[in-house]
Image: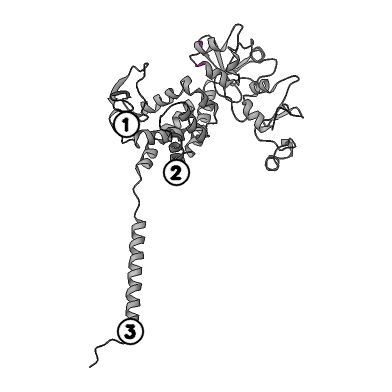
């Protein structure tokens, strides 16, 4: 009896076995891929602390993406000894003005003093306050969504000694899409300011308006509160401001209002290098950054008015006005006497077609 399997059968059996092995491998791969992957340490950190970073951005202006990236990098996603035992997520050292709890670790030198906190939220708040020092003041002149320049600015200002520090932050932001939290921070900031304005809103009589509004027609205030003897008001563009009194200077006002002098210069687009600035009586002094967009589409410039004066009147930064209206040293004023406050105009000085299509012919 011939026990030898025909060659054709042998090939068919081999092919069948091969297909079975392939399907088994594909099935195992499918099962493995179908299993939910545990979040990585940075992803867990983001899920836990993104809301805190967004809140800090709304209150203090530091991009949430930068705060989260620094926290991941400095604390090893919250797992470093300094973070886990002392709640210090940003590696902030004691420095001379620190009066809180202290711990000691080896860093650039042996036994260096680091700040210790009762909880990690305090660390996030202290990080925001730390960056508001004059050493980092130039960062707050950047767009809050420009995380690349913020990261490079932190390195330039000496936050860290690692020459690759800025690149490390940018890579983390882009790898985990942290820039989406910057938009959330801006939205929360707008909501908080609108809520504060609504909470403190009060009726203002026509005579009061005439007394507080400048001859150049600052939009009437939406609310009014007091800081010391100063009446702090909120403009139509939801920015807190005061009106200068005779003898005021930015340096003296900074002390009176418990602010840094650089903040008044930056918020009001005044060049600090020209010396101590003394505003005229009745001049608007913003206590918060001006906006990148206005509440109206256009602003009619007044006779003899400069771009800076128009900026103070509408609460839109000079930088934003210049960009939106394509102004240049050769053409420093709009030819039609109108400034676009919401959209960048075309080279002909008109709103983009899509804006006019959506908002109708009366937009111009």
Q: Residue at x 35, y 34 (%)?
A: 75
- 128, 362: nearer the viewer: 128
Q: Residues within 10 Å of mark 3 (few under 14, many from 20)?
A: few
- Label 2–label 3 contact, CB within 8 A: no
Say which element carries label 2. helix
Is 355 on the left or on the right of 224, as rendered? right
- 131, 223: nearer the viewer: 131
Q: Residues within 10 Å of mark 1 (few under 14, many from 20)?
A: many
Separation of disc 3 and disc 1 at Cα? 67 Å
- In the rendered image, which quarter contains the N terminus? bottom left
- 10, 323: nearer the viewer: 10
Separation of disc 2 and disc 1 at Cα? 23 Å
Say which element carries label 3. helix
Q: Is residue 127 magenta?
A: no
Residue 51 shows in this picture: no
Name the N-terminal-most of marks 2 and 3. Answer: 3
Q: Residue furthest left?
A: 1
Say which element carries label 1. helix
Q: Residue furthest bottom?
A: 1
- Classify residue 208 by image quadrant: top right
Residue 105 shows in this picture: yes
- In the rendered image, which quarter contains the C terminus? top right
Q: Which residues are magenta?
A: 256-260
**Chief SS of the magenta region:** loop
Q: Residue at x 49, y 38 (%)?
A: 179
The label on residue 252 is none
Residue topped by disc 2: 175
Residue topped by disc 1: 83
Residue topped by disc 3: 9
């Amino acid at each position: 009896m011939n026990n030898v399997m025909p060659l054709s059968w042998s090939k068919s059996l081999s092919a069948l076995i091969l297909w079975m092995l392939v399907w088994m491998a594909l099935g195992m791969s499918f099962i493995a891929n179908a299993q939910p992957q545990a979040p990585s340490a940075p992803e867990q950190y983001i899920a836990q602390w993104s809301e805190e970073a967004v809140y800090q951005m709304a209150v203090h202006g530091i991009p949430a993406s930068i705060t989260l990236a620094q926290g991941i990098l400095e604390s090893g996603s919250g797992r470093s000894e300094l973070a886990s035992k002392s709640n210090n997520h940003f590696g902030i050292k004691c420095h001379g003005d620190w009066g809180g709890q202290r711990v000691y670790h080896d860093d650039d030198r042996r036994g260096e003093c680091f700040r210790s906190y009762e909880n990690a939220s305090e660390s996030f708040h202290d990080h925001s306050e730390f960056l508001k020092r004059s050493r980092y003041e130039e960062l707050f002149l950047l767009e809050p969504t420009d995380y690349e320049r913020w990261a490079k600015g932190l390195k330039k200002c000496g936050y860290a000694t690692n020459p690759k520090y800025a690149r490390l932050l940018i890579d983390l932001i882009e790898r985990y899409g942290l820039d989406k939290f910057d938009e959330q921070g801006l939205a929360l900031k707008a909501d908080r300011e609108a809520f504060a304005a609504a909470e403190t809103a009060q009726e203002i009589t026509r005579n009061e308006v005439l007394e507080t509004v400048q001859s150049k027609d600052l939009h009437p205030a939406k609310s009014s509160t007091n800081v010391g003897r100063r009446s702090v008001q909120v403009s139509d563009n939801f920015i807190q401001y005061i009106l200068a009194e005779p003898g005021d200077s930015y340096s003296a006002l900074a002390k009176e209002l418990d602010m840094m002098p650089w903040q008044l210069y930056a918020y009001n687009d005044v060049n600090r290098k020209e010396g101590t600035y003394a505003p005229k009586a009745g001049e608007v002094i913003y206590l918060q950054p001006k906006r990148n967009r206005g509440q109206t589409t256009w602003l009619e410039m007044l006779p003899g008015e400069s771009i800076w004066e128009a900026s103070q009147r509408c609460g839109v930064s000079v930088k934003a006005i210049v960009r939106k209206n394509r102004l240049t040293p050769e053409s420093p004023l709009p030819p039609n006497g109108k400034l676009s406050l919401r959209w960048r105009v075309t080279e002909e000085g008109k709103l983009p077609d899509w804006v006019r299509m959506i908002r109708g012919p009366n937009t111009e």
